[in-house]
Image (cartoon, helix red, strand yellow):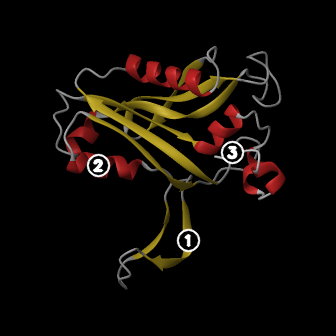
Amino acid sequence: MQDTLYLASPIKGESGRDDDLRTLLRTHTSSMQIRYMQTHQPPIRIVAPGRVYRRDDLDVTHSPAFTQIEALVVGEGISLADLKGTLLAFARQMFSPTSRVRFRPSFFPYTEPSAEIDLSCWQCDGAGCAMCKRTGWIEMGGCGMVHPAVFEAVGYDAEKYTGFAWGIGIERVAILRYQVEDIRLFYENDLRFLEQFPY
């Protein structure tokens, strides 16, 4: 609840109906995963992008409004090792063949176990610098194994299926990949900065 932002005045939803009023700014794109599971059977492999809003302080690596990508994999025999291997392969393909990832235990309501994903700092290679706040690591996002209660809620057999989910911010990926020192540069609309990224 402390991470959630609400509009002071409701706006009409996509239906345009007078009774379809909305005040909540979404904090995650997880609702897309649930909708997909409600209409599809495993195996599932999806990526759900979208704009999200949180009460984060604006600093070099955080923003209260950003674009999130969440991934969901569901099937038989999916394990925590599959999750870590997927994220390590992503990090090495996206950033550097020598990238390292680590999991820090955390809590997310729909995964168990849950973890924060950290990537070895590109600027100091783990020695500690201002970018990584002298830790050698930069937080990329959250992840975990899908909680069996989620599968039960969408009608999946939690004894048969397991799965993992992860979420990261696109802007966080961009600052890591392109070695941008401050995430705020992406929001300042300075064409001299933005034209460096033609895609």
Across and down, in percent, residue 11 comes to 49, 78
| Residue 58 seen in the figure | no
Q: Which residue is depicted at the point 18% across and 38% down?
A: 156
The 10 Å Cα crowd at callout 2, few under 14, some 14 to 19, many 20 or more, is some
Kindly identify the amino acid type of the residue bearing the numbered disc 3.
His
Q: Residue 74 lies in what quarter of the image? A: top left
Secondary structure of residue under mark 2: helix
Across and down, in percent, residue 93 comes to 56, 24
Residue mark closest to the camera, 3 vs 1: 3
Kindly identify the amino acid type of the residue bearing the numbered disc 2.
Tyr
The 10 Å Cα crowd at callout 1, few under 14, some 14 to 19, many 20 or more, is few
Q: Nearer the viewer, residue 181 or 148?
A: 181
Q: CA distance from mark 3 to mark 2?
A: 29 Å
Across and down, in percent, residue 60 comes to 77, 42
Residue that lies at the very extreme toward the front in this rendered image:
198
Secondary structure of residue under mark 1: strand
Query: If you read the primary sequence from the N terminus, does the residue marked by circle 2 or circle 1 appear first?
Result: 1
Q: CA distance from mark 3 to mark 1?
A: 21 Å
Query: If you read the primary sequence from the N terminus, does the residue marked by circle 3 or circle 1 appear first?
Result: 1
Q: Is 8 displayed left or right of 31 in the figure?
A: right
Residue 192 to residue 152: above or below: below
Residue mark closest to the camera, 3 vs 2: 2
Kindly identify the amino acid type of the residue bearing the numbered disc 1.
Leu
Residue 195 to residue 126: above or below: below
Q: Which residue is depicted at the point 68% across and 50% down?
A: 63
Numbered mark located on residue 36 in the image: 2
Query: If you read the primary sequence from the N terminus, does the residue marked by circle 3 or circle 2 appear first?
Result: 2
Name the residue beneath numbered marker 1. 7
Name the residue beneath numbered marker 3. 62
Q: CA distance from mark 2 to mark 1?
A: 27 Å
